[in-house]
Amino acid sequence: MKYPEKPEDIETEILISVANGGEQRIRKLGRVIADVNPEMIVEGVLRVFEREDRPTNLFTDQKFAGQILKITKPKSERTALEILKRTVKNWDKSVAELPLWMKENFGEGILSEAFRLYSMSETDPDGKIKTMEFWIKQK
């Protein structure tokens, strides 16, 4: 496991963890990247949530990416709406870590407003925004 120099490195390490190491390797990755620029961590994780080329691994890829958010708790200056626009389409509704991190990062009020704005400008035929709203009210 190498120290990441760019977001793509974090994305790659998450995918390697899915293939070769499981939970133990993802926890180690979380420790290795603990002092990495938080925006680089966020970008690497978002890249995993955006991936559409691994449909059979979608849940596990995103679950491990979510674990990185949970372990490192990176703060982001991106807007909640930007993150929603990048992730909702491909997000697996069983992966609670993404909306829970967003709640922690932005606060419930800002996140609720982002849900409203997203719903005004984008379609959500799979009800993913409603599921995110459910998750943030559970914890």
Image (tube, helix red, strand yellow):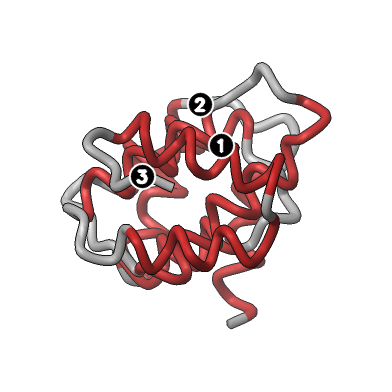
According to the image, label 3 marks what residue?
Answer: 2
* Cα–Cα gap, marks 3 and 2: 38 Å
- The residue at the far bottom in this view is 139
105 and 125: which is toward the camera: 105
* Cα–Cα gap, marks 2 and 1: 10 Å
Counting from the top left corner in percent of width and height, residue 123 is at: 59, 26
108 and 55: which is toward the camera: 55
Which residue corresponds to the image point at 16% horizontal and 51% vertical from the top-left?
A: 77
Query: Is residue 67 placed above or below 39 in the rendered structure?
Result: below
Position of residue 68 in the picture relative to residue 22 (left or right): left
Find numbered disc 1 in the image and state the secondary structure of the residue it sits on. Answer: helix
According to the image, label 2 marks what residue?
Answer: 122
Which residue corresponds to the image point at 23% horizontal and 62% vertical from the top-left?
A: 75
Counting from the top left corner in percent of width and height, residue 83 is at: 38, 41
N-term-proximal mark, 3 vs 2: 3
How many residues crowd around disc 1 within 10 Å: few (fewer than 14), some, or many (20 or more)? some
46 and 31: which is toward the camera: 31
Position of residue 18 in the picture relative to residue 65 (left or right): right
According to the image, label 1 marks what residue?
Answer: 88
Counting from the top left corner in percent of width and height, residue 61 is at: 65, 42
Which residue corresponds to the image point at 53% horizontal and 67% vertical from the top-left?
A: 27
Which residue corresponds to the image point at 32% horizontal and 39% vertical from the top-left?
A: 43
Counting from the top left corner in percent of width and height, residue 36 is at: 21, 55
N-term-proximal mark, 2 vs 1: 1
